[in-house]
Image (cartoon, rainbow, N blue to C red):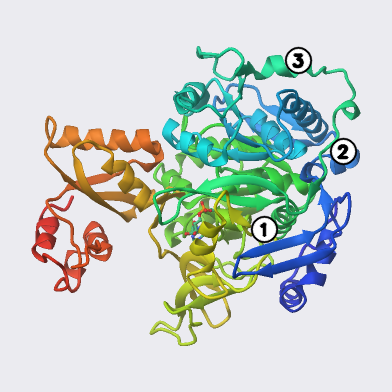
Amino acid sequence: MSYPYQLKSIEAYRAAYKKSVEDPESFWTEIAENFKWRKKWDKVLNWNFKEPRIEWFAGGKLNITENCLDRHLETLGDKPAIIWESNDPEERTRVVTYERLHKRVCQFAQVLKNNGIKKGDRVCIYMGMIPELAYAVLACARIGAIHSVIFGGFSARSIADRLEDTKAECIITCDGAYRGGKDIPLKSVIDDALVGNNLVKKVIVYTRTRIPVSMIKGRDVWWEDEMLKVTDTLPVEGFGDAEVMDAEDPLFILYTSGSTGKPKGVVHTTAGYMVWTNYTFVNTFQYQPGQVHFCTADIGWITGHSYILYGPLSAGATSVMFEGIPTWPDAGRFWDIVDKYKVDILYTAPTAIRSLMGYGLDPIKDKDLSSLKVLGSVGEPINEEAWNWYNEHIGKKRCPIVDTWWQTENGGILISNLAGVTPSRPSWATLPLPGVQPVLVDENGKEVTEKDEEGFYKGNLCMKAPWPGMLRTTYGDHERCRTTYFATYDNLYFTGDGALKDEEGNYRITGRVDDVLNVSGHRIGTAEVENAINMHASVVESAVVGYPHPIKGLGIYAYVIVTGFHGDEERTRQDIVQTVSRIIGPIAKPDKIQFVTGLPKTRSGKIMRRILRKIAEGELDKVGDTSTLLDPAVVDGIKEGKL
Ligand code: WTA
């Protein structure tokens, strides 16, 4: 494959950026020409941010899996599409060539059809990181079913909410999953999620851990049995036809947290998402044919969707998929994988880097990391210390680091340096990709034109124009999409992040300005955690804020009012943690719970989170003016009890 749209110099980047702003339609036409279409589009872009309505390549017909699989068969058929590394370092590697991946996807697509799934149906996928997860996702895309992958760290209750919201009739899962030293009983969690659900007609279960599972007649079927019915010898042409999709047909729904208590289903559509993940993959990482790309994210998150599956596969790359965790059985796991598969591009998260830094240099000592060419970071601002460690000990100062800023809603990378092409700068995401038009605004939506005392423009990060990979709606509730992203400021998409900009137009992301926390790179809404805490029988009220955590980035700090302790304080604390784990999932467990007798509220009853944040951060003398509070004395009590 060649990528005529790969930007190989800073001049090329500048020229492309200029063109993308001045003439987006011809800019994206030239790029989209490089994909496989059943029918070309009628109109490159229709949009308004009022409704909002965003359409890219309208009238175009295609199937994204033909772009990720079929078009590579002739030239890359015997090349690895996916290299799978087990949780268990002793277990055999699975190398899935493009030919094999194509075949498995076509076969599983047929299994889905045999089980009554058709275009437009929603399919929830709750699996560990095994190749079958990739087959399941791509098979949905093959037949035009809308996939919604649910991360393995979510509880039955969270799954039930998502099932209800998507109205899914099919779930694909495993008996269990391995993650580090743990075996997670996925099917049993699904069974709990299905209590009271009468929409789901089929549960397809792949065997991974072979723990006993309950299989309900008529509803639950084994993946392996279903695959056998789709004969291995039948030529793929016999059943491999991909559904022809409209450019704007939904490809997937992915739930993410926001300011309210209920996660929203971000909807991505087919053509724009495909073009965007491919374009950003090829340019940000400066991918060269034949390279091995290792993105350490889980496919339960957007990073896995875009940079394990769709981006790399549409570019014909080899994508490493790792089932386990970086610290099991020891903290050398990532480096073993880099060494073993001669990884060229490593894309991981600051929280992983910080956690590995804590193990010192021993786990790296005997590992050959010389294959590495590019390092990437995503998920939260990368602090300078972690950046420097990554640069020195992993990249050996030879590898450019791309600090890629983006969001679930964005489909792919929006602001990042391009590896070795545009300059990198510790803790700065730097420049927008072509097609991305950021603007910093003040609270009233006015563009910030004055620099602050440090010489930076500082404001809330918005986008002035659409890019092909942006969300189109939130599933089942378009109005929610409008009010969340397009109503804060007139005619702008609001990201929820704050940022600084320098004179040269480089951006530094400072973090969320809304009530969303980035905990170990996972997005968690404070309102969601509060709702879960409030479910506990003894809890009267709670308020949740983030505080700086050396590894997680942010930790979860909860201030809780209870009617009394059951047992003792510590027991009650554990019960609350357990409640959150049940309601949302282990990823949302509070790190600290402080019992308080009151919360700082204004006279109108609004909780002053700014004060709680300052206390959680340990800045007790910086809580500021408390005179507008209903009862200023509560603040002193909270300060005294700080954990
Ligand atoms: C944060 C992950 C600083 C940001 C792809 C954003 C970052 C949220 C960066 C989205 C980065 C992501 N620098 N902050 N390079 N990348 N973020 O939806 O606050 O899981 O709004 O998407 O992560 O998280 P999400």
| Distance CA(mark 2)–CA(mark 3) | 24 Å
Q: Residue at x 53, y 32 (%)?
A: 324
| Residue at the image position 58 percent from the left and 38 percent from the top | 149
In terms of sequence position, does the residue under pointer 3 or pointer 1 come before the other? 3
Report whether the residue tagged 2 is closer than 8 Å to ligand 1: no
Mark 2 lies on a secondary structure that is: helix
- Side (left or right) of 168 relative to 226: left
Q: Which residue is mark 1?
A: 469
Q: Which mark is residue 228?
A: 3
Q: Is residue 118 visible?
A: yes
- Residue 212 x %, y %: 50, 12
Q: Which disc is residue 73 wearing? A: 2
Q: Position of residue 619 (x, y in %)?
A: 21, 64
Residue 340 placement (x, y as % from top left): 65, 34
Above or below, 277 against 630 in this view is: above
Q: Is residue 381 left or right of residue 547?
A: right
**Gap between marks 3 and 1 measured at Cα:** 37 Å
Q: Amino acid at mark 1?
A: Gly
**Which quadrant would residue 434 be assigned to in this image?**
bottom right
Report whether 30 appears left or right of 191. right
